[in-house]
Image: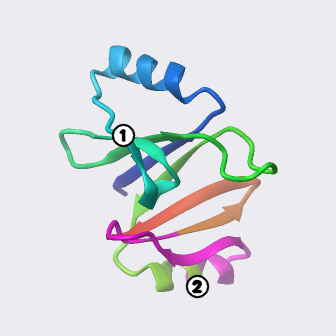
Amino acid sequence: MTVHYLEIVSNDVDTLTALYQRMHGLSFGPPDPDLGQARVATRADGSLVGIRKPLAAHEQPIMRTYLAVEDIQQAVKKAEELGATIAYPPTRQGQRGTFAIVIQGDVQHGLWQR
């Protein structure tokens, strides 16, 4: 298992980016339209950390990990066969790849294919 993207949704982006910069030495770029206006930092291993505001009134603050997968269609299909709810089907995210979110055990599981 490899983490591709750690997404942090918060109403206080500035405070959290400052925390992660000081605590982890990350350097965040400007808001990225491909990732919901998240401010994104790239770690030395190539994984991404993004901090953004909620995109809708119903979206709550959350820390969501997107695991890299070779075939997102297959991964989502297998998750659904095992009883997971598909919160977001495979969706192209600009030039960054395709993501999906499945819910199992009351936990949101992010998947990402580059």
Left or right position of 67 against 80: left
| Residue at image point 49% right, 85% down | 73
List x then y, in percent, for residue 83. 73, 75
Left or right position of 6 against 44: right
Given the image, on which type of amino acid does mark 1 rest?
A: Pro
Question: Quick check: is 79 in the magenta stretch?
Answer: yes
> How many residues crowd around disc 2 within 10 Å: few (fewer than 14), some, or many (20 or more)?
few
Q: Which residue is mark 2?
A: 77
Left or right position of 54 against 36: right
Given the image, on which type of amino acid does mark 2 rest?
A: Lys
Q: Quadrant of the C terminus?
A: bottom left
Question: Quick check: is 113 in the magenta stretch?
Answer: no
- 102, 26: nearer the viewer: 26
Q: Quadrant of the N terminus?
A: bottom left
Position of residue 71 relative to residue 99, above or below, is: below
- 107, 61: nearer the viewer: 61
Quarter of the image for residue 50 reads top left
Q: Give the number of marks.
A: 2
| Residue at image point 43% right, 61% down | 34
Mark toward the viewer: 2 or 1: 1
| Residue at image point 70% right, 63% down | 103
Q: Bounds of the magenta span?
A: 77-99
Q: Secondary structure at mark 1?
A: loop
List x then y, in percent, for residue 16. 51, 24
List x then y, in percent, for residue 14. 50, 24
Q: Which residue is mark 1?
A: 30
- 73, 19: nearer the viewer: 19
Residues under labels 2 and 1: Cα distance?
35 Å
